Image: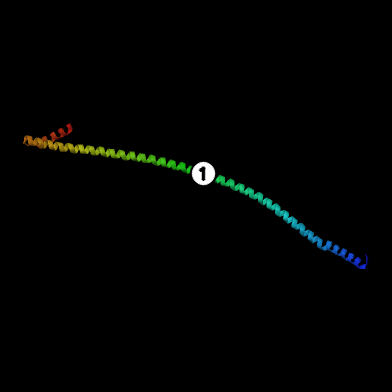
C-alpha cells in the first residue's frame, strides 16, 4: 500500500472536519438532546404528579359523594320524621274536631228531644182536653182549663 500526499490531505481534512463538527455542530446537538431529555423528565414528573393529584381528587370526590349521600339520607330521615309528626298532629286535630262535632250534634239532639217531648205534651194535653170536653160536654172556663193542662203536662 502506497501512502501518498492524497492520503495525508484526506487525513488532515478529516481531522479538520472532526474538529469543525466538535466545535460548531456537536455542542448545539448536545444542548438540544439535553434540553429534550430535561423536558421529557419534566413531562414524566408532571405525569406522575398528575396521576397522584388525580388519585387524590378521585378520593376526595368519593369522600364528598359519601358525605353527600349521608347528608341526603339524614335530610330524608328528618323529612320522614316531620311527616310522621305532622300526620300524628293532623290525626289528633281530626279526633278533636270529630269529638266537638259529636258533642254539638248530641246537644242538638238533646234539644230536639226536649222540644219533641214538649210538643207531645202539648198535643197530649190538647187531646185530653178534647176528650174531657166531649165527656163532660160542658164548658170549663179558660183559666181552669190552663191550670189543668199545666198540671197534666207536669205529671207527664
Direction from residue 150 to residue 49 in the image, left or right: right
Direction from residue 17 to residue 135 in the image, left or right: left
Which residue is at a point 31% across and 39% down the rendered structure image?
102
Q: Say which quarter of the image contains residue 136.
A: top left
Q: Residue furthest top?
A: 155
Crowd class of label 1 (few under 14; some 14 to 19; many from 20; radius 10 Å): few
* Residue 65 position within the rendered picture, expressed as x and y whole percent measured from the top left: 56, 47
Which residue is at a point 81% across and 61% down the rendered structure image?
26
Q: Residue furthest bottom?
A: 6
Is 25 situated above or below 82?
A: below
Seen from the viewer's position, the closer of residues 57 and 123 is 57
Q: Residue furthest left?
A: 138
Mark 1 secondary-structure assignment: helix
Which of the colour schemes (rainbow, by chain, secondary structure, one colour) is used?
rainbow
Direction from residue 34 to residue 8 in the image, left or right: right
Is 68 situated above or below 28?
A: above
Which residue is at a point 26% across and 39% down the rendered structure image?
109
Mark 1, residue position: 73
Quarter occupied by the N terminus: bottom right
Seen from the viewer's position, the closer of residues 119 and 84 is 84
* Residue 20 position within the rendered picture, expressed as x and y whole percent measured from the top left: 84, 64
Amino acid at each position: 500500500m502506497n501512502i501518498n500526499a492524497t492520503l495525508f490531505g484526506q487525513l488532515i481534512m478529516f481531522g479538520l472536519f472532526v474538529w469543525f463538527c466538535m466545535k460548531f455542530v456537536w455542542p448545539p446537538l448536545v444542548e438540544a438532546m439535553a434540553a429534550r431529555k430535561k423536558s421529557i423528565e419534566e413531562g414524566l414528573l408532571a405525569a406522575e404528579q398528575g396521576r397522584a393529584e388525580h388519585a387524590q381528587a378521585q378520593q376526595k370526590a368519593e369522600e364528598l359523594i359519601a358525605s353527600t349521600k349521608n347528608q341526603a339520607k339524614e335530610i330524608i330521615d328528618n323529612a320522614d320524621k316531620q311527616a310522621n309528626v305532622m300526620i300524628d298532629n293532623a290525626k289528633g286535630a281530626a279526633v278533636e274536631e270529630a269529638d266537638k262535632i259529636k258533642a254539638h250534634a248530641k246537644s242538638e239532639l238533646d234539644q230536639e228531644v226536649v222540644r219533641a217531648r214538649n210538643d207531645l205534651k202539648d198535643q197530649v194535653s190538647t187531646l185530653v182536653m178534647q176528650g174531657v170536653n166531649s165527656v163532660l160536654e160542658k164548658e170549663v172556663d179558660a183559666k181552669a182549663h190552663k191550670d189543668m193542662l199545666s198540671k197534666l203536662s207536669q205529671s207527664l
